[in-house]
Amino acid sequence: MKKEDTVKLISAEGFEFVVDKEAAMVSQTIHNMLTSPGSFAERQHGEVTFPEISTTILEKICQYFYWHLQFASGKETEFPIEPELTLELMMAANYLHT
Amino acid sequence: MDMYIRVKRSKTTYFIRCKPSDKILDIKQKLQELIDQPAINQRLILPDTGEVLEDSKTLADQRVENDAVVALTLRKDENEFEEVNIVRPNDFYQARDADGANWWYDEIHNCSGNIFKRLIKCRVNDVLVCIILNLLP
């Protein structure tokens, strides 16, 4: 795995999550950021900051990306979500088109 | 992909795709690409037990499973590595207490219609029913 095949997602509190681009593109919003022609800073630097997504939520979203890839390849498990995360997670999922 | 692990150091988490049969050295070599530190300068540790993971053993040998958290420490000098340092976020969810009920009440009234309906499902039924509707691929 090479650095250029990854993207760094940064939460509101400045925590960094380095994930495979393939995983991050489960989000249509991130997919658009990373693939649009033109000079999105996100594409040039391989970093995306989410000032409105908290660290705990962003980590759960990254876990979901990988779960999604596993599920798509036939590993059918349940994705665990703590009830207290539900509301914020739905709002973030809506923003990320995930 | 078979599985992934979360490798954490300070405020950074690296999601590493791997297989249970991968050796610890394989993981370090993947990390080397990301952090520009050779495998010999890396030490991987199970944060709960403090157990240092051995290069020649596999993830399965050392009972590292899908989605596990592993701490990364880097070499300071010839004889010494950093201490484990994983910064915990102190966003709302970690600090939550008895105000939870009020929090729910306030949030419900701030929701847009769509999310409101989804949230009602969440509270009336098992949370997974709601989540599955929204997040399944």
Image (spheres, helix red, strand yellow):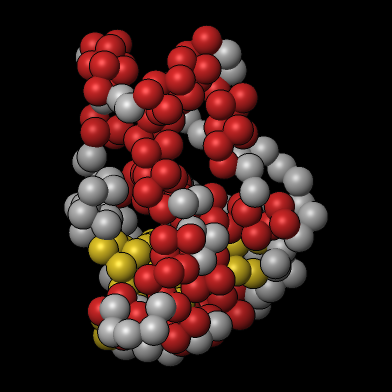
- Along the line of sight, which residue is nearer the eye, A90 or B89? A90
- Identified at 49% across, 73% down, the residue is A21
| Residue A80 placement (x, y as % from top left) | 57, 36
- Along the line of sight, which residue is nearer the eye, A81 or A43? A43
| Residue A86 placement (x, y as % from top left) | 43, 30
- Identified at 65% across, 60% down, the residue is A69
- Along the line of sight, which residue is nearer the eye, A23 or A90? A90
- Identified at 27% across, 57% down, the residue is A50
| Residue A66 placement (x, y as % from top left) | 58, 58
- Identified at 54% across, 60% down, the residue is A26
Depicted B33 relative to depicted B90: above or below: below
User: In the picture provided, is B34 more to the left or to the right than B78?
Assistant: right
Counting labels gives 0
User: In the picture provided, is B114 more to the left or to the right than B22?
Assistant: left
User: In the picture provided, is A96 more to the left or to the right than A98?
Assistant: left
Depicted B74 relative to depicted A78: above or below: below
Q: Quadrant of residue B42?
A: bottom left
Q: Quadrant of residue B53?
A: bottom right
The answer, for residue A80, to whether it is visible in the render is no
| Residue B15 placement (x, y as % from top left) | 49, 65
The answer, for residue A39, to whether it is visible in the render is yes
Name the quadrant of the N terminus of chain A: bottom right
- Along the line of sight, which residue is nearer the eye, A45 or B111? B111
Q: Quadrant of residue B126?
A: top right
